[in-house]
Image: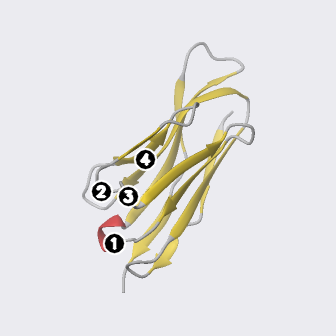
Amino acid sequence: QVQLVESGGGLVQPGGSLRLSCAASGSIFSINDMGWYRQAPGKQRELVAGITRGGIPNYAESAKGRFTISRDNAKNTASLQMNSLKPEDTGTYYCTARLRTYRSVGLSDYWGRGTQVTVSS
C-alpha cells in the first residue's frame, strides 16, 4: 500500500526558513496532484500549496510570495520551501497525493501523518 512520509519540520524564529519534504512510496502507478495542508488546533485543515504533475503550483493567499512547492516525479517526492516564516504559519503540515496504484481504478487521495512546524520567538 501507499505511504507518505513528511520530514523537515521544527522550531524556527519568525523570519526564518524551513524546507519540508514528502516521500511517497509503495505500489504507485502514477501521482497526479501533490500538496501540503496545514492544521492548527481548533482550526480547519487548509491547503497551503498544491502542485500538478506538470509542475503547475497553486498557493493559499497567506503563502504566496513566501512559500514554494516543488516535486520530483521520478522520485515521487514533493517539497515545500518556506521563507519569511510567521507565527501564524505554525501548525501540523500534512503531505497529500492524489494517485493511482497498480490495483486501483481511478484516483485516490493519500495522506501522511504530518510534521510539526512551530514559528515562535
> What amino acid does circle 2 point to?
Ser
Q: Position of residue 4 (x, y in %)?
A: 62, 45
Residue located 49% across and 43% down the image: 35
- C-alpha separation, residue under disc 2 versus residue under disc 1: 10 Å
Residue located 39% across and 75% down the image: 119
Q: Is residue 48 above or below residue 92?
A: above
Q: Between disc 2 and disc 4, whose residue precedes?
A: 4
Label 3 packing within 10 angstroms: few (<14), some (14-19), many (20+):
few
Contact, mark 2 vs mark 4 (Cβ under 8 Å): no
Q: Is residue 29 above or below residue 105?
A: below
Q: Between disc 3 and disc 4, whose residue precedes?
A: 4
Q: Is residue 38 above or below residue 97?
A: below
Q: Nearer the viewer, mark 3 or mark 4?
A: 3
Residue located 59% across and 65% down the image: 8
Q: Between disc 1 and disc 3, whose residue precedes?
A: 3
Q: Nearer the viewer, mark 1 or mark 3?
A: 3
Residue found farthest to the front = 65
Corner quadrant of residue 103: top right
In the displayed structure image, the side of residue 21 where residue 18 appears, left or right: left
In the displayed structure image, the side of residue 2 where residue 36 appears, left or right: left
Contact, mark 4 vs mark 1 (Cβ under 8 Å): no
Residue identifier under label 3: 65
Q: Position of residue 9 (x, y in %)?
A: 53, 67
Residue identifier under label 1: 86
- C-alpha separation, residue under disc 2 versus residue under disc 3: 9 Å
Front position in the image: 62 or 42: 62
Quadrant including the N terminus: top right
Residue identifier under label 4: 49
